[in-house]
Image: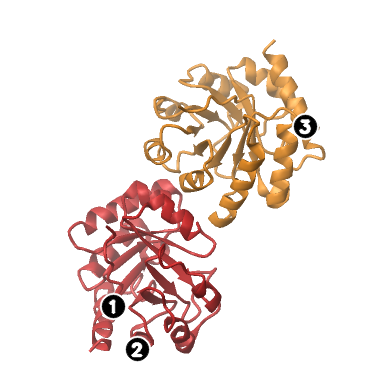
Chain colours: A red, B orange
Amino acid sequence: MRPVVDLSVYLVLDPDLCGGAQGMIDTTRAAVQNGATCVQLRAPQWKKRELVECGRALKALLVGTGVPLIINDHADVCLAVNAEGLHVGQDDLSPEDARAIIGSDRVLGLSVSDMDELQNVNASLVDHLGIGPIFSTATKKDAGSALGIEGFAALARLKPCPVVAIGSVKTPIVADLMHAGADGVAVVSAICGQPDPAAATRQLANAVANARL
Amino acid sequence: MRPVVDLSVYLVLDPDLCGGAQGMIDTTRAAVQNGATCVQLRAPQWKKRELVECGRALKALLVGTGVPLIINDHADVCLAVNAEGLHVGQDDLSPEDARAIIGSDRVLGLSVSDMDELQNVNASLVDHLGIGPIFSTATKKDAGSALGIEGFAALARLKPCPVVAIGSVKTPIVADLMHAGADGVAVVSAICGQPDPAAATRQLANAVANARL
């Protein structure tokens, strides 16, 4: 049975913004204590030995919190770490290949940036989507062109499964994104590298909760 | 049961030297028809969708030849392609993690560049070693310092499993390497990007065979 993932405040870790592995662990602890509901380990510039080591430390930190750990791109690292899920982009493993490797008990997320990609989603393989970038972003250089809130809404309206909005999402636009169909917001720099990641997470979590009222 | 791998002439593909995926396929065909006994797909700069696609094409090409396909670094791609083996470096998945993912029916190779790494090899997990670089090399930027033939011999003397010599290996030094304990030679630029990859492979295969006389 796959865990049900609460996408409300989905933290995507960035080793550069966080200041390395220990910074990612510290950021995760602060975020999870203050309302982050999902954590993704993403470090495309890292070799796998370091990814596995950091992933295991994150997994140990998250035990008992109910917050799942999602590994970006690398299904093998997901297995080695025994993470709850994998996230793939359009140039990574196909959802078919990814699902065959991670099995039926892990969640699988997929990045989607336009209508063609959305209409190609096989919701029997994929559990949730990251739709973006909402605005152009410095933390993911291969992301597509910015959707804006209108563009996000057009895609989210047709969502075949839950979606998070991603790409330069900050607290002031959370309500608009939630009203446009987001099931949560995924953030990198809105938490990683912030002077007070705990407070930054609380603000995001409050904004998501308030938008649901 | 793991396939027994003939390491005699081990081709490591390089997409830049070969000129992309089709170039790697053409190079592989020419090499295998002329004595290459093992083929590794290595393209660290590629995303996985492209790696899987190319890996499947190589696998289709190699069916019935008895030449195994080894995937560099990515155990998930190895599974997706159903390749015969995986090759990991010291910063990649650990042999323990790699073996747990690929199972007992695939071969596992490991890169070793010094005595410490050699003495840490667990030969119950690892099937063969790539020892190098013999000389400094432009095709693998994270390789250690050059061993020379003497340095290679010092390591090969203590080998716990079969070894290939790698790192700027060219035909004129094949005999020395074989006499120093190599079970074969692994090459990138000695085949990839050569004006006549077929002839280049034949020369290497002849040099290996002659060294065994």
Q: Which residue in the protein does label 2 denote?
A: A179
Which quadrant does the C terminus of chain B fall into? top right
* Chain label for disc 1: A
Q: Position of residue A52 (x, y in %)?
A: 36, 49
Q: Which residue in the protein does label 3 denote?
A: B200
Determine if residue B45 is in view: no
Q: Nearer the viewer, residue B18 or B55?
A: B55
Dot in front, 2 or 3: 2
Q: Residue furthest top?
A: B213
Q: Position of residue A34 (x, y in %)?
A: 21, 73
User: Marks 1 and 2: in contact by CB < 8 Å?
Assistant: no
In the picture provided, is A178 more to the left or to the right than B63? left
Discs 3, 1: same chain = no
Determine if residue A72 is in view: yes
Q: Position of residue A136 (x, y in %)?
A: 51, 79
Q: Which residue in the protein does label 1 denote?
A: A200
Dot in front, 2 or 1: 2
Q: Position of residue A112 (x, y in %)?
A: 48, 72
The disc, 2 or 1, on the residue closer to the chain's N-terminal end is 2
Instruction: Calculate the distance from the C-alpha at mark 2 to the C-alpha at mark 1.
Output: 21 Å
Q: Amino acid at mark 1?
A: Ala
* Chain label for disc 2: A
In the picture provided, is B202 more to the left or to the right than B111? right
